[in-house]
Structure formats: C-alpha cells, structure tokens
Image (cartoon, rainbow, N blue to C red):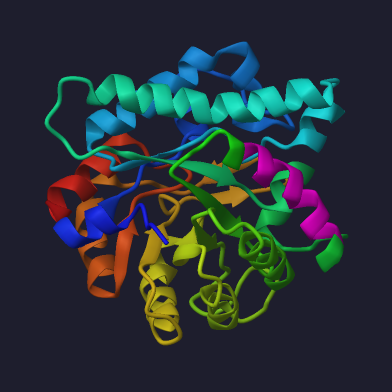
Amino acid sequence: MDDPLAPFLRGRGSLVLDGGLATELERAGFDLDHPLWSARLLSERPEAIAAVHRAYLEAGADCITTASYQATIAGFARMGATTAEAEGLLRRSVELALEARDSFRHGRDRQRPLVAASIGPYGAFLANGSEYTGAYDLDLEELVAFHSPRMAVLLEARPDLLACETIPSAVEARALARLLSGRHHARAWVSFSCRDGSRLWDGSSFADSVATVATVPQVVAIGVNCTAPSHVQDLLRAAAAVTEKPLVAYPNSGETYDAATRTWRGLSDALDWGDRALAWRDAGARLIGGCCRTGPDHVSAVRRSLG
C-alpha cells in the first residue's frame, strides 16, 4: 500500500502543511459570510483560490489542501446547483490545487508537493458552528450516507490523499473510518477538533477516537487541527500513546471563533510559530502547519524551523 507521506518522512522526517484557506481569502477582500464559505469561490473566483495555493507553496508548504472543506453535494444543491454541477465543483477544487502545484513546481528542483482533498465535518455543511460542538442531529448510518458521495467524487479527481479534518465527534470519526476502510486505494489523514488537551468537542475521548481510526490501513496519519495551540502538545502525547502512525498538528492561530457572531477574537502571532512547530515535533508531530487565521508567514516560520 503506497503512502504519499513516506518520501517526505524518510527524507526530512517531517512535512510542512499549508495554513488557513478561507481566512486568507478574507484577508484578500472576499466576503465569505455564506453557507458555502470558501467553496462559493470555486465557481465565482477560482483564480483567487489558486493564488492562495500558490502563496503557500511559495512559503514552503509541502502539501496544499483543497477548497472543499465546506463543499458538499447537498450544500451546493441547497444553493440551487444540480448534482452534476455540484460534482463538477468538487472535482474543480482538486483540479485547482493540482494545477497550482504543477505550475509552481515547473522548473524547480524540489520534491513534488502533495495535494490533500479536504473533507470537513458535517458541522461545516450546517454552517452553524457545530464543528466546534459536535452537536449533530445525525446518527452513524446517516453520517456515513452524508460523507460518502463527496468522498467518492473527490477520490475520482485523484488527489494525493484526503484530509478528513476538524472532526469534533466520536461518531463522525467512526463514520469516516468505515468509509475509508471500504476504499482500498484511498489514503487519508484524520484530524480532530478538540475542546481541551484530552477531549473532542462532543466531550468524548480524543485518544479513543485516535485508536478507532488508527486501525484503518487507509489512514496514514492522525492528529489535531482547528484547535487552540495551547492544547496541541497534550493531544499529541495522548495520540502517541495509542498509535505509531505519523501525527498531524495544524491548530488555529490562537484566536477563538465565536459562532454566534461569526467572528474571531484574540490575537495571532506568526513570529513564534516556528518555535511552536519544534515543540510539536518534539511531542511527536510529523505533519505540521496551521489552520484558521494562520497564513503564509506562519508556514514560512515552520519551514525555517523544520529545515
């Protein structure tokens, strides 16, 4: 079973991820206060998405993540798209990243960066902040049915791997594990969103959910994202106690999201991101980057620190 992470981990021992996509688009002036968030630009301004991908590659990212976090067939249908149109936009998210990667790499003597197709949680589709609570109205079978069509379409577009990310719920982790185990050629990392150093947002055990998805051969890395940086080292240590698979860490900038007002509060500091990356590597992380409110400066700091 081929592992797309292996060449990076054998060579340097680590892989640099990108940072936030939607928040970079907002910094560029785009209004993403919309149920589709950054996914609305797949049809309206795809070149803006490609520009963010390019900026992260220039900053030193070894892997860029597609603009499909909040993109689902059901979500596009809610906005009036046909099934065929929705599937086309999902494929386009992967194509944009692949094109940005290939354009960037042309003429450069650099290891081929990866493209990870983002699969966000059910809460991202709801667009009500429930990816920060895990308070869902679907059971296991319904979550399997929700995630299955998008996963199938994204895999058809041939990304290097999937990024099943910001998972706040133990039952959602089980749903994704079932779907991945049924797709022999899929490769994925699974990363969880956590309320503290030991629990997912739904209150369940982070370590237990890590152990659940670690049994799936198609899962090539496991960890945490979209979580306060202060919790990351404890979470990595908890994950390392139950799996030997490579660990992932790409937390938020340190700011806190207010779901009621749809705003971020607090401060972000890119200058210490390199030091944090070293601490996360010491705690076991091998895939390191940033999530919401982090940008190319954060990724550059990680690249400099990790070499």
* Relative horizontal placement of residue 281, taking residue 139 as reference (left or right): left
Given the current orientation, which residue lies at the most extreme bottom position? 241
Does residue 306 appear anywhere in the picture? Answer: yes
Q: Which residues are magenta?
A: 142-154
* Relative horizontal placement of residue 251, taking residue 9 as reference (left or right): right
* Relative horizontal placement of residue 56, taking residue 137 as reference (left or right): left
Residue, x 27% and y 53% (percent of image)?
A: 15
Residue, x 82% and y 36% (percent of image)?
A: 74
Q: Residue 196 magenta-drawn?
A: no
Name the quadrant of the N terminus. Answer: bottom left
Q: Is 18 placed above or below 289 here? A: above
Q: Residue 153 magenta-drawn?
A: yes
Residue, x 48% and y 44% (percent of image)?
A: 292
Image quadrant in which you'd find residue 109: top left
Q: Is 100 placed above or below 163 here? A: above
- Expressed as whole percent of the image width and height from the top left, the position of residue 298 reads 29, 43
